[in-house]
Amino acid sequence: MPEGQAIHRIARLINERFEGADVVASSPQGRFSDGARRLDGLTAGRAEAWGKHFFMPFADGGSFARADNGPSSGMPAGSALQSEEESSSGRLNAKNAIAPGAEHLAETPLGGTSLGDDGPLWLHIHLGLYGRWHFTGEGSDAIVGAGVRSGNHNAVNVGAGSTVRLRLAANGFTADLTGPSRCEILDGPGVRAAVSKLGPDPVRNEPGDRERFVEAVRRRRSPVGQLVLDQSIAAGPGNIYRADCLFRVGISPLRPGNKVSAERLKALWDDLVETMQADVPDGVIRTVPESLRPEPAKASGAKNPDAESADGDDPEAQRFAVYHRTGRPCLRCGTPVAEKEMAGRRLFWCPSCQR
């Protein structure tokens, strides 16, 4: 399943092609015909991601007139969500706090529309395990990464056999969606209800998110490795970020959440923010610390001369610290990376470096 940074990237790719355009929407597969009919001919607004969820507003022409008179290339801006049940806590009505070095990720939404506003129709998509987008149009052939189908797309014909749930077309560009676990039209309250079930998103990193994350983890007795994947605690991290960010800050995934200090959890949140934001532009996850990343054809254990070849038996050491490296030497200490199942997911960690 694509992790949250991939959904933020997809939102940016779709904004670059469709934001502010009158969109032709269809459902070649037929399973989203009613929804596509409601979107057809409307103007697309600024798409946003929250964790692994994608939201895009559509309204009558003129509602999303471009403020900059040009194509959008930034990441989704912060939202100003409000609902009766959450307005008192302020959880959903803060603007983005942008991490140092990521200032380019913020941009004002078209027409000032904020995630969950009343008025527009909202397209809500969750890719799940099998969902993919396929883009056509100038420059689209080079788009690869999680959640994106690259190369020739053969299942695009209308009628029997098509797997395209939703097709968006405008200005010579086409985006085909196949295999999502969820594809639906929501109103503003529906969006607010969906987001209210999600925890803070490290890519968005809004004010107070770190504190909410720390508080949520420290209230639980479950292993922190299980809590990091709980989308109501942190929206977006998947198995790769779970494994490698816990390694990077030295926390054992087996330690109960209420036994991890607030300071260590703050460091974990900050590391999730840093790694996930850094991976948005090209969609490629690289979580191995730069200081531990082996050079090709050199030992994969930076401090362990007996480690195996990084470009031979251990190629994943170029991208991951412990993820999918079961039995390989830890890049920091040389201890074999351990694996076990936790809540139905494969868990990877270094028994020596993570306490």
Image (cartoon, helix red, strand yellow):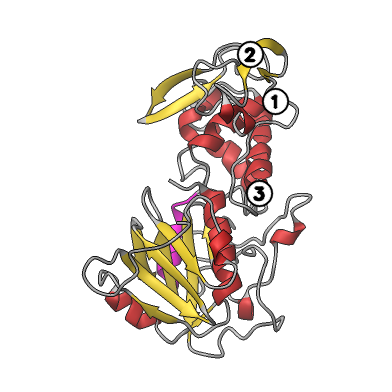
Label located before the other in sequence (2 or 3): 3
Amino acid of disc 3: Gln
| Disc 3 element | helix
> In the rendered image, which residue does mark 3 sit on?
277
Where residue 158 sits in the image (x, y, percent)? 28, 75
Where residue 84 sits in the image (x, y, percent)? 48, 65
Look at the numbered discs 1 and 2 and tell me whether their residues touch, using CB distance below 8 Å: yes
Look at the numbered discs 2 and 3 and tell me whether their residues touch, using CB distance below 8 Å: no
Residue 190 lies in the magenta-colored region:
yes
> In the rendered image, which residue does mark 1 sit on?
294
Label 1 neighbourhood size at 10 Å, few (<14), some (14-19), many (20+)?
Answer: many
The picture quadrant where one finds residue 332 is top right
> In the rendered image, which residue does mark 2 sit on?
307
Q: Residue at x 56, y 21 (%)?
A: 252
Q: Residue at x 58, y 41 (%)?
A: 213
Is residue 159 depicted above or below 333 in this figure?
Answer: below
| Disc 1 element | loop
Q: CA distance from mark 1 to mark 2?
A: 10 Å
Label 3 neighbourhood size at 10 Å, few (<14), some (14-19), many (20+)?
Answer: many
Look at the numbered discs 3 and 1 and tell me whether their residues touch, using CB distance below 8 Å: no
Where residue 52 sits in the image (x, y, percent)? 48, 52
Residue 265 is left or right of residue 44, and the answer is right
Q: CA distance from mark 3 to mark 1?
A: 23 Å
Amino acid of disc 2: Ala
Amino acid of disc 1: Pro
Is residue 231 depicted above or below 227 in this figure?
Answer: below
Label located before the other in sequence (3 or 1): 3
